[in-house]
Amino acid sequence: MSNVVKVGMADLNVVTSPDTIRTSGLGSCVGVILYDERAQVAGMAHVMLPDSSYARNDKLNRAKYADTALEDLIDRVVAIGATKPRLKAKMAGGAQMFNFSSSNEAMRIGPRNAESVKEQLKKFRVPVVYEDTGGGSGRTIEFNPATSVLEIRTVNKGVIKV
């Protein structure tokens, strides 16, 4: 019997086959999946902001920021059986949910989240094998480590499996 492990906003978690892992409510946030096909393990982070320098209080939620969440997610998937050189990534989200007439960089949070996640993955030498980012619609994603298939449900656009 398999379970669906849910990942909330600013959260991360890991699964082993036959369980799957899901996050909902991806707007400007980015859902990142790291997985090892051979070990059939995966981890997912629901990243809200690109950089931990945005943290305003003393207690840092490392899962909230791309620069800290990816490091922790790698450690967690390796702890349950993944091998770092075999890790691959899929990602979705990073939408621009609202149109602003301002050219203020702070208003581009979705694209900046996606860029920051890709920079971190490059830093850790984890290849991105699929990306569905940008646009203006929210997404829900679910990953199955047994098949390495990511299901992406996009508001008003339906479901794709990659």
Image (cartoon, helix red, strand yellow):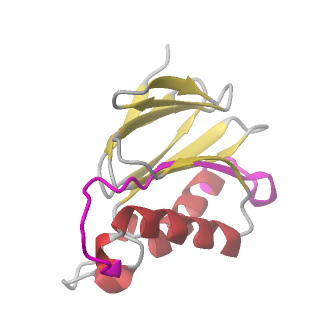
Pick the quarter of the image with the C terminus: top right
Count of labels in the image: 0
Residue with the most extreme top position: 1
Taking 22 as reference, is 48 above or below it?
below
**Residue 24 percent coordinates (x, y):** 33, 38
Q: Quadrant of residue 138?
A: top left
**Residue 137 percent coordinates (x, y):** 35, 42
Q: Quadrant of residue 112?
A: bottom left
**Residue 26 percent coordinates (x, y):** 35, 46
Residue at left offset 49%, top offset 19%:
2
Span shown in magenta: 79-105
In the rendered structure, the answer to whether residue 155 lies left or right of residue 115 reads: left
Q: Is residue 131 magenta?
A: no
In the rendered structure, the answer to whether residue 8 lies left or right of residue 65 reads: left
Taking 4 as reference, is 92 above or below it?
below
Taking 66 as reference, is 33 above or below it?
above
Residue at left offset 20%, top offset 84%:
56
Res. 109 visible in picture: yes
Taking 51 as reference, is 137 above or below it?
above
Residue at left offset 53%, top offset 38%:
15
In the rendered structure, the answer to whether residue 20 lies left or right of residue 22 reads: right
Residue at left offset 60%, top offset 52%:
77
Q: Quadrant of residue 22?
A: top left
**Residue 68 percent coordinates (x, y):** 46, 73
Q: Is residue 87 magenta?
A: yes
Residue with the most extreme front position: 101
Res. 64 visible in picture: no
Residue with the most extreme left position: 57
